[in-house]
Image: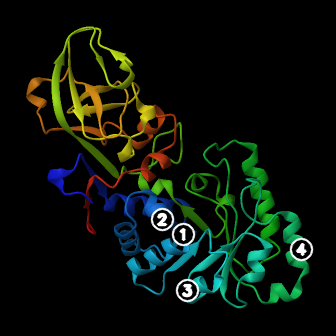
Amino acid sequence: MTNLDQAGGVLTVDLDAIASNWRTLKARVAPVEVAAVVKANAYGVGVTPVVRALGAAGCKTFFVATLDEALEVKAALGAPQRRIFALNPPPARPEAAAAAGIVPVLCTIEQVRAWPAGEPAALKIDTGMSRRGLTSGELDTLAADAALIRGLNLVLVMSHLACAEIPDHPLNERQRTAFAAARARFPTVPGSLANSSGAFLPASYHFDLVRAGAALYGINPTPGRANPMRPVVQLNARIVQVRDVDAGTTVGYGATHRFARPSRVATVAVGYADGYPRSLSNRGFGYIGGVRVPLVGRVSMDLASFDVTDVPAAQLTHEGFIELIGPHVTVDDVADAASTIGYEILTNLGRRYHRRYTGANG
């Protein structure tokens, strides 16, 4: 984390909002348990403060991608009663995960055979995403191996929805049906299918455990409808120079923007090296007070420029800030302008920001 006086931007994370979002999802799917997906440094937000805030709120189950991430979460929680699942367990040394008490999500027959008998594990079934998990044929092979089944201590059977954010997509029901059939082979083992958007599908999709990721961090799990989640992240970029330019002047690499009128330009010390995408060039926007300021020219590695002509002079100061994410500009707004998704915006948040954590656990 960069010191405030040296940082080109200030990233503020509301831990109370994260805890509130978890409670909102918990109430939505009750009595089903809601786990927190905190992989990729809690979607770029900061895994240690996030898992501590969620643990204090009552979350007992966490999902990460790798063993290293799992060990970081375990150290942050310091609570043996919490369960930590690794979605991509180490293929070469499964005993390392077992020794640490990390529950792997086994996705292939080879992983099942390599996992120490009797150690807790989850089993992932591919129901239509065609990415990871046992196919129906591999599930038949597993079911036919009585010795392997006897040695497998399953604590969860899971799959993943491909189109949950599109409620009427036909693949949702096909996956739900396929998962119900696969889970019937393990009638005493809890099942998990729904992600953040899946929590807003009918209760038949929720099974025993919902795995909440993006929604915890304020990304809208119901695109096209009002966001039921509280915003979590604010990003304010420091203004490092303000200049007046004549009509016809261009700005930035490639001279891709030409001013049609005499204008005022504010340059901020945030660029694509900080996770502010180059694809926002001539498309992004920020706010100063209540005034929208368009991004002009190309985003460069360390800098981006905004047309602040319409901002009252009293609100525009050197070393002031432009809101890039916040009350006027949501993460989803930034993602739309960049032709991507909120997940990518959050997980690319850079290391050069000064980070502030607010809330009871901040």
**Residue at the image point whose x is 35% and y is 24% from the top:** 297
How far from the left and from the top, in percent, is residue 343? Answer: 49, 49
Image quarter of residue 301: top left
Q: Tell me, yes or no, whether the two marked residues, 2 and 4, touch with CB atoms within 8 Å.
A: no
Label 2 sits on residue = 38
**Residue at the image point whose x is 44% and y is 46% from the top:** 345
Q: Nearer the viewer, residue 28 or 118?
A: 118
Question: Callout 1: few (<14), some (14-19), or many (20+) C-alpha neighbours within 10 Å?
Answer: many
Residue type, mark 3 in image: Gly
Which comes before the other along the chain, label 2 or label 1? Answer: 2
Which residue is at the far right? 144
Label 1 sits on residue = 63
Label 3 sits on residue = 101
Whether residue 310 sits left or right of residue 24 in the image: it is: left
Whether residue 362 sits left or right of residue 101 in the image: it is: left
Q: Secondary structure at mark 2?
A: loop
Residue type, mark 4 in image: Thr
Instruction: Measure how far apart labels 1 and 4 are at the Cα level.
Output: 27 Å
Instruction: Measure how far apart labels 3 and 4 are at the Cα level.
Output: 28 Å
Residue type, mark 1 in image: Phe
Q: Quadrant of the C terminus?
A: bottom left
Residue type, mark 2 in image: Val
Q: Secondary structure at mark 3?
A: loop
The tag on residue 141 is 4
Instruction: Measure how far apart labels 1 and 3 are at the Cα level.
Output: 13 Å
